[in-house]
């Protein structure tokens, strides 16, 4: 598991990019945390820099939308979903568990 | 309801129009005519990742897995040569015609060429996939590249060529590159990226001609300077593909003239994307827009007009981006010459900033360099402001 930051450092509506072999974006949606691949599947852009609208994030480059809960594309031009990753909060710290199955495939 | 819609042009605007027709519940036949043999692909990577060899043809394909459900009748590798507006049929270069109840004109634009460069090997423009493949092959064995024109295409090609290890010189007629879209101050700031990355930029100098027989050897400038070149890329803008409509009776200017809803002056014919010049109420003139987002989003409006379901015209906030030397440049809004620009965040010296253009104290456009998060917020604010005022 990768430690991300204290829960207090990620306010509702905010996102943070976690550096990893394949970077991960962690979002706070009204107190619930979600983690997905940070790089848009359309073209190279960081989804942590995107616009958060409910449980969807809009890519800052071409406005592709992804559902944070499923990783599925909810708005084009992206065609391929992003992976989702498990988020664990323990002792006031946010951790992500990278999706190992997909890691193995990558 | 129409039985056949002909979409002329099979790039981003044409494909987006075909998708919009199905999304808007049109269940008739859709014929998509494209002069390139390739299935639709995305053009922006052609000067960036694709040219560098980092992105493959598959990576830049515009087709989606569920496109088969669109049930499109493709006519690729076929050029439309005329539009018979009375019979409303599209005439093709193979002598056949497509009779249609509705026509979407999305023939795009083509790169302007340098007069006198015809038939000279090593001289390239960059617009199509074939252009990009040819340029990539030529760059692989070249040492010195001269780029004519320091606009976005020229700057991106220069940037990519530097990553490939070439010695690069960019020549620009204007005293400040990108002054048109960004204004002189910000144009100059962006142009500094060239020097940062070892590209020589020569401004305020014209090109007298190309030197070489069979293959280009040098670019001669109006001041007499000769720049040795193994490869030359000409990036001096684009011309709308509308000549084929000369006898159609359509009103043509710098593109097919349309109203704000993409309607031409011929019923049942709409135009969208790089080939169209739409009426801008705020600008009080027809404006032709060559941005990717425009070609991606506007076809929905064109199709609604064609199907007769169009609502009030939306005032889009123009948006474009450019990736150069690892810097991401994003711009949204409509800038005028006398707008005042100021940097709100970051600094130009750090190549990371957000600048806002103001008119009478109100923000009208925003420019970001390596500030995607802040830029996105500003872009949305501009969109909200436009919606409120329109």
Image (cartoon, helix red, strand yellow):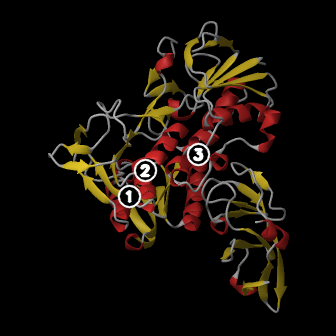
Neighbourhood count class around disc 1 (C-alpha, 10 Å): few under 14, some 14–19, many 20 upward: many
**Residue A74 appears at what percent x and percent y?**
78, 53
Tag in front: 3 or 1: 1
User: Is residue B28 positioned above or below B189 on the image?
Assistant: above
Q: Which mark is residue B139?
A: 2
User: Mark 1, chain letter?
Assistant: B
Same chain, marks 2 and 1?
yes
Determine the secondary structure under disc 1: loop
**Residue B96 appears at what percent x and percent y?**
64, 10
Q: Is residue A67 left or right of residue B145?
A: right
Same chain, marks 3 and 1?
yes
Tag in front: 3 or 2: 2
**Which residue has dot 1 on it?**
B166
**Residue B370 appears at what percent x and percent y?**
50, 67
| Contact check, label 2 and label 1, Cβ < 8 Å | yes
Along the line of sight, which residue is nearer the eye, A106 or A16?
A106
User: Mark 2, chain letter?
Assistant: B
Q: Is residue B31 left or right of residue A43?
A: right
Q: Which quadrant, please, contains the N terminus of chain A?
A: bottom right
**Which residue has dot 3 on it?**
B293
């Amino acid at each position: 598991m990768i430690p991300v930051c204290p829960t207090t450092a990620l306010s509702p509506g905010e996102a943070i990019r976690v550096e990893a072999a394949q970077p991960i974006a962690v979002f706070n949606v009204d107190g619930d945390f979600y983690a997905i691949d940070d790089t848009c599947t359309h073209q190279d852009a960081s989804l942590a820099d995107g616009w958060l609208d409910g449980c969807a994030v809009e890519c800052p480059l071409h406005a592709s939308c992804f559902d944070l809960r499923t990783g599925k594309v909810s708005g084009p031009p992206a065609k391929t979903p992003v992976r989702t990753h498990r988020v664990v909060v323990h002792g006031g710290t946010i951790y992500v568990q990278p999706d190992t199955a997909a890691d193995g495939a990558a | 309801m129409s039985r056949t819609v002909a979409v002329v042009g099979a790039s981003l605007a044409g494909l987006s129009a075909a998708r919009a027709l199905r999304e808007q519940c049109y269940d008739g036949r859709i014929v998509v005519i494209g002069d390139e043999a390739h299935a639709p692909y995305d053009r922006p990577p052609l000067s960036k990742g694709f040219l560098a060899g980092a992105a493959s043809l598959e990576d830049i394909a515009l087709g989606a897995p569920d496109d088969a459900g669109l049930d499109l009748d493709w006519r690729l590798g076929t050029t439309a040569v005329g539009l018979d507006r009375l019979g409303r049929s599209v005439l093709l270069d193979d002598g056949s015609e497509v009779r249609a109840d509705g026509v979407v004109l999305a023939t795009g634009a083509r790169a302007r060429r340098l007069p006198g460069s015809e038939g000279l090997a090593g001289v390239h423009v960059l617009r199509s996939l074939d252009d990009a493949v040819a340029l990539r092959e030529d760059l692989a064995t070249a040492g010195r590249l001269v780029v004519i024109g320091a606009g976005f295409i020229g700057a991106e090609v220069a940037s990519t060529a530097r990553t490939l290890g070439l010695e690069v010189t960019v020549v620009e007629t204007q005293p400040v590159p990108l002054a048109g879209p960004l204004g002189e101050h910000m144009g100059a700031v962006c142009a500094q990226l060239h020097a940062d990355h070892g590209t020589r930029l020569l401004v305020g100098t014209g090109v007298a001609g190309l030197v070489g027989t069979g293959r280009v050897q040098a670019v001669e400038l109006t001041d007499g300077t000769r720049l040795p070149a193994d490869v030359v890329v000409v990036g001096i803008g684009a011309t709308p593909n509308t000549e084929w409509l000369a006898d159609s009776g359509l009103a043509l200017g710098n593109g097919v003239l349309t109203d704000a809803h993409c309607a031409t002056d011929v019923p049942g014919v709409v135009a969208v994307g790089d080939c169209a010049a739409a009426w801008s109420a705020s600008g009080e003139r027809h404006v032709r827009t060559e941005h990717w987002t425009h070609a991606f989003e506007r076809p929905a409006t064109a199709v609604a007009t064609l199907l007769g379901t169009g609502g009030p015209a939306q005032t889009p906030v123009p948006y474009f981006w450019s990736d150069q030397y690892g810097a991401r440049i994003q711009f949204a809004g409509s800038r005028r010459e006398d707008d005042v620009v100021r940097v709100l965040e970051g600094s130009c010296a750090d190549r990371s900033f957000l600048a806002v253009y103001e008119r009478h104290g109100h923000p009208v456009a925003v420019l970001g360099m390596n500030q995607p998060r802040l830029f996105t917020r500003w872009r949305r604010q501009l969109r909200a402001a436009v919606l409120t005022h329109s």
